[in-house]
Image (spheres, helix red, strand yellow):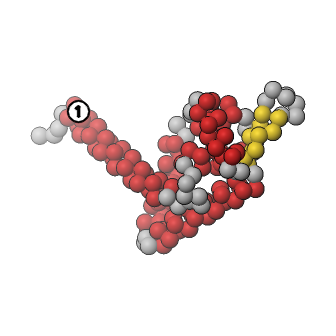
């Protein structure tokens, strides 16, 4: 006797749920291992994310940074103040609109991003070296799919 459509669907839902949970957990663990590879141990993940954003985009306003990181402007202001006090970024009045202030990396901030990225890439490269060529191919394909999911 073949399973009814309702039971087949619930089996598929259960399998999809298990796959989602497994992927979430594996992604979380990998992200945690990568985040541990940093140039400044005392820097929070949120602070590094601000530096990395500025490194990718160039100068942004406080509001733009807050929106990108999905935090409130007051919360971002505290983060930016701390990073500015540490010498990792600067605030400069906008040339065309003096009401706006652009936030950008200093050379020290850029160096933290570059060194952290270097350490994370080195750690991941070492981990990948322990895998079979087939496993590395699977992960390469998975990276493309993960970007697609993340872009939703």
The foreground one among 42 and 69 is: 42
Query: For the point 31% across and 41% down, which residue is it?
Result: 17
Residue 34 visible: no
Inspect this view and state whether residue 6 appears.
yes
Could you tell me which residue is drawn at 76 percent across and 56 percent down?
107
Observer-nearest of 121 and 90: 90
Give the image location of residue 11, x and y in percent. Answer: 23, 40
- 42 up-or-down from 1: above or below: below
Q: Position of residue 1 (x, y in %)?
A: 11, 40
Q: Position of residue 145 (x, y in %)?
A: 49, 49
**Residue 73 x/y as whole percent:** 63, 30
Read off the residue under disc 1.
Answer: 5
Q: Nearer the viewer, residue 12 or 71?
A: 71
Label 1 Cα neighbours within 10 Å, binned few <14 / some 14-19 / many ≥20 = few
In this image, 73 relative to 107: left or right?
Answer: left
Identity of the residue drawn at 61% across and 64% down: 118
| Figure disc tally | 1
Determine whether, in the image, residue 88 is placed left or right of residue 143: right
């Amino acid at each position: 006797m073949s399973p009814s459509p309702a039971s087949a669907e619930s089996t598929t839902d259960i399998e999809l749920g298990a796959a989602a949970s497994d992927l979430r957990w594996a992604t979380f663990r990998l992200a945690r291992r990568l985040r541990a590879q940093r140039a400044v141990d005392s820097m929070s993940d949120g602070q590094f994310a601000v530096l990395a954003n500025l490194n990718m985009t160039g100068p942004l306003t406080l509001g733009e940074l807050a929106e990108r990181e999905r935090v409130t402007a007051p919360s971002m202001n505290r983060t930016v103040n701390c990073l500015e006090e540490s010498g990792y970024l600067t605030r400069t009045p906008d040339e065309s609109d003096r009401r706006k202030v652009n936030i950008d990396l200093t050379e020290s901030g850029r160096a933290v991003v570059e060194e952290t990225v270097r350490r994370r890439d080195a750690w991941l490269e070492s981990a990948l070296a322990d895998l079979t060529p087939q496993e590395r191919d699977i992960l390469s394909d998975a990276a493309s799919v993960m970007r697609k999911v993340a872009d939703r």
